[in-house]
Image (tube, rainbow, N blue to C red):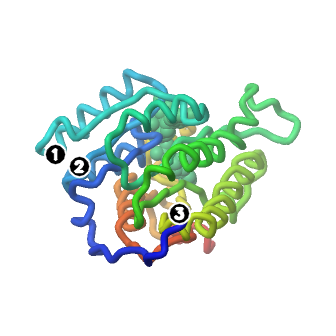
Amino acid sequence: MSTEAPIPFSHPLPESLADRTVLILGGSSGVGKATGLMLRSLGARVVLVARDADRLAAAAADVRAAGDSTDAVVTAAADATDEKELQRVVDSIDKLDHVLVTAASVSFGSLFDDHGGRGDESLTTRFNAGWNAARVTVPRLPAGGSLTFLSGDMIDRPQPGGSVVSAGVGAIEALTRALAVELAPRRVRVNAIRLGSTDTPLIRGFLGEDADAAVTALGAALPLGRLGTAEEAASAAIFLMCNYNTTGSTLSVDGGQTLV
Ligand SMILES: NC(=O)c1ccc[n+]([C@@H]2O[C@H](COP(=O)([O-])OP(=O)(O)OC[C@H]3O[C@@H](n4cnc5c(N)ncnc54)[C@H](OP(=O)(O)O)[C@@H]3O)[C@@H](O)[C@H]2O)c1
């Protein structure tokens, strides 16, 4: 479908997201949950999706508490790599304006490791979640609607043992630019956020028992002296949703990490 009209004007401040509906794939933790909290405080409706139903329910309780209308938060336990499950979720939503995809698997191992049998997930989960999200949501998105994907600094700063992670973020950034061109005639925008080390349950899961000390030590080695926060990443996602002149962009939120 192509529309003859240019993309509409919309006020580029976050307040313009009031009453919009945002689907968050990866909404039970880290950046996805922080974005849900911020969107609720702006009066948006959110649909949180993740696989673990208990963690999802706990996140939804927190997100509901951030706004004044508890029915503005909906959850659906689903695997973003399963297109049929995602289609079911999207069919159950009345209205949809923006989509954020944070779902990904991250595992490390050298070329000859089997990554605990999960190496290919690090490569494919991020891409498949983004691809499926686009396939099932784009027919529902209005002019000005958007998809936002998550990439990471390992595209620019590869580490030994991180090949599949680097390849996965490379794939999502390439998909971002390609879909931005393909979907521009529909006036649907596609952007990515390239995160540096950010203090979320994901990174803490790699840091062992004294994660607080490890977070401090890791942050001290970065140009700005600390890790990013999930809220700083969430505010980038919100910027990309409400700025209607932004598509095909990869916005770095990395504290300068990729410069050194
Ligand atoms: N934190 C960092 O330092 C960092 C740095 C660079 C890039 N990133 C990227 O930023 C994104 C967000 O990271 P985060 O730190 O917020 O991670 P997180 O705290 O681990 O959250 C990931 C979320 O995605 C969900 N998820 C994972 N696989 C899924 C699937 N197949 N289907 C549906 N939901 C799924 C998880 O819930 P379930 O497991 O219950 O499904 C969880 O809600 C990721 O793409 C990550 O690679 C993070």
Q: Residue furthest left?
A: 68
The three-letter code of the residue at mark 3 reads Val
| Residue linked to disc 3 | 190
Q: Which kind of residue does numbered mark 2 sit on?
A: Arg
Q: Is residue 88 above or below residue 21?
A: above
Label 1 vs label 3: CA separation?
27 Å
- Residue at 22 percent across and 65 percent down: it is 15
Q: CA distance from mark 3 to mark 2?
A: 22 Å
| Residue at the spot 41% in from the left edge and 44% down from the top edge | 24
Q: Quadrant of residue 141?
A: bottom left
Query: Looking at the image, which is closer to me, 213 or 248?
Result: 248
Q: Residue at x 38, y 26 (%)?
A: 55
Q: Residues within 10 Å of mark 3 (few under 14, many from 20)?
A: many
Q: Is 209 in front, or is 112?
A: 112
The single residue placed furthest to the right in the displayed view is: 112
Q: Disc 1 residue type?
A: Gly
The residue lying toward the viewer, choosing from 3 and 69, is: 3
Tell me the crowding category of disc 2: few under 14, some 14 to 19, or many 20 or more residues within 10 angstroms, Cα based. many
Considering the image in quadrants, where does the N terminus appear? bottom right
Q: Is residue 242 above or below residue 9?
A: above
User: Of the residues under marks 3 and 2, which one precedes in the sequence?
Assistant: 2
**Residue 223 is at least partly visible in this image:** no
Residue 62 at x, y percent in the picture: 24, 36
Q: Is residue 20 above or below residue 241?
A: above
Q: Which residue is mark 2?
A: 40
Q: Which mark is residue 67?
A: 1
Question: Under tag 3, what secondary structure?
Answer: strand
**Does the residue at mark 1 contact the one at mark 2 (Cβ under 8 Å)?**
yes
- Please say if 217 is above or below 189: above
Figure quadrant of residue 235: bottom left
Mark 3 against mark 2, which lies toward the viewer?
3
